Structure formats: C-alpha cells, structure tokens
Amino acid sequence: MSYKVAIDGPSGAGKSTLSRAVAKKLGFIYIDTGALYRAIGLYVYRNGIDADSEKAVASSLSDINIDIKFVDGTQRVFLNGGDVSDDIRIHAVSDYTSKVSAYPAVRAFLLDTQRRLAESDNVIMDGRDIGTVVLPDADVKIFLTASAEDRAERRYKELVEKGQNVDYDTVLHDVIERDDRDMNRAVAPLRAAADAVVADTTGFELEQSQRLLMDIIRERLQ
Ligand code: DC
C-alpha cells in the first residue's frame, strides 16, 4: 500500500518548496511535474519552434525524450539525455511552458510518464491537474493558493536571488497572465478537484504554510 498526495495550484503558491519540505518530513518521494512541462517548453524555446503553433509543438514531441532521475533524493530532469534541471528555471522558459502546456498533445504525452512516476512509492506530486486528471484516486488532494500579489512577490525574490534581472511589476503581470491561461485552457484547466482541500497561504510565512499542509495530510492519512 502506498500513499499518493496530490498538490495543485497556481504558479508561485509555494507548491514546490512546500511539497519538497513536507515530503522530506513524511519520508515520501516528491515529484515536481512542472519540470516535465518545462523541459518541453525549454526544447521549444531552444529550437526556435513557434510556441503559439499547436501543430509545430505537437510535431516536435516525437523528437523529445524526457526522463526524471533522483540524485541524492533530489529530482533531476533530463531532456534527450542532458540534465536541464537548472535551464528549465529561466524566466523566458516559464512563458513558453505555459503556452505549450495548454496543448492536448503535450498533456497526453506527459500523462503516462507522470502516472508511472507515481506508481512505485509513497509520493507527493505537485502540478495543476494532479488531483483532477493524473491521480484522480489520490489519498489526499490539496489545492494550494495565495493572492497574485503574494505569489508574484515570492517569485520576484526567487528570481532576484538567482541573479536574474526582473522587475516586480513584470513578474506580477506574468503571474496574472499565466493564471488566466492556466485556468481558462480547454484541456485540464487549473481548478480544485471537488474533493480537494483548499489551502490559502496569503500572508503566511513558510513555516505556517508547512504546518497547514502537514495537518491536512496527517489528518487524512490516519
Ligand atoms: O509549476 P511550474 O511553475 O514549474 O509549472 C510550469 C508551467 O507548466 C505552468 O505554466 C503550468 C504548467 N503545468 C501544467 O500545466 N500541469 C502540470 N501538472 C504542471 C505544470
């Protein structure tokens, strides 16, 4: 018997930081599905493929091989054999990824990979449609959210810490635009599963958010 915890929500809600921390506490494997989509976004970006053309992106999928490996318990993403775990975090790739992740062919391409990754162990998997599409039978489903301003501020700080040259207003604008695209796409739009617990962390420090998630998970896994 293995447990599946699905954590969905908009970008910048702290899903990956919190999921990683909570997985460590529980001894679960953390799987970041955004990294898989980002690897496709990176491929499209690097190869000058028109991200606005569904046809162009869909036909490039046959040239893409994505794999995840765990190195010292940390997830690394491989695109056609090369470790792209750092490159997928560049700001420009986020925009490409948001576009390509709206295409049904891309979502279908990654569905099996995600289910296979969730099979073996106790896992916490984060994404946008884990509770609704990828793992509809997950033992715990959490929809993690926070105000757009809070999320933009976290993302902004993260990017500045990485030495990237961005301004807050641009990041906020991008967050709102991406939310809109993620929530309004025809396939697997971002929404809370009917049986998900909504966790709103607006104004919360990391520790408070972590405690909230731990409480929700512990209560449901009893
Ligand atoms: O979580 P993230 O910011 O790394 O996700 C990057 C993009 O991928 C984001 O625009 C939403 C998309 N995504 C998705 O559509 N489905 C997932 N399961 C994970 C991410």
Image (tube, rainbow, N blue to C red):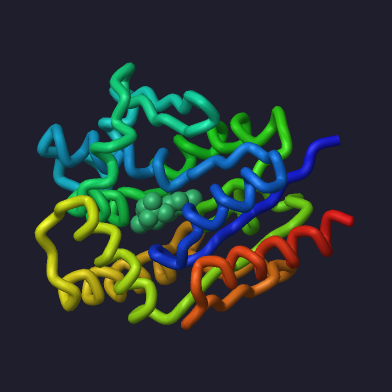
Residues 199 and 81: in front is 199
Q: Position of residue 148 (x, y in %)?
A: 37, 79
Residue 64 as seen in the image, left or right of residue 117 = left
Residue drawn 57% across the image and 53% down it: 19
Q: Position of residue 33 (x, y in %)?
A: 48, 44
Residue drawn 31% across the image and 67% down it: 178
Residue drawn 70% across the image and 61% down it: 214
| Residue, far right | 222
Residue 53 visible somewhere in the drawing = no
In the image, is residue 79 above or below residue 150?
above
Residue drawn 67% across the image and 47% down it: 25
Residue 153 visible somewhere in the drawing = yes
In the image, is residue 152 above or below residue 79?
below
Q: Quadrant of the N terminus?
A: top right
In the image, is residue 1 above or below residue 70?
below
In the image, is residue 132 above or below residue 100?
below
Q: Position of residue 200 (x, y in %)?
A: 56, 78
Q: Position of residue 105 (x, y in %)?
A: 40, 42
Q: How many tags in the picture? A: 0
Residues 176 and 209: in front is 209
Residues 177 and 160: in front is 160
Q: Quadrant of the C terminus?
A: bottom right
Quadrant position of residue 47: top left
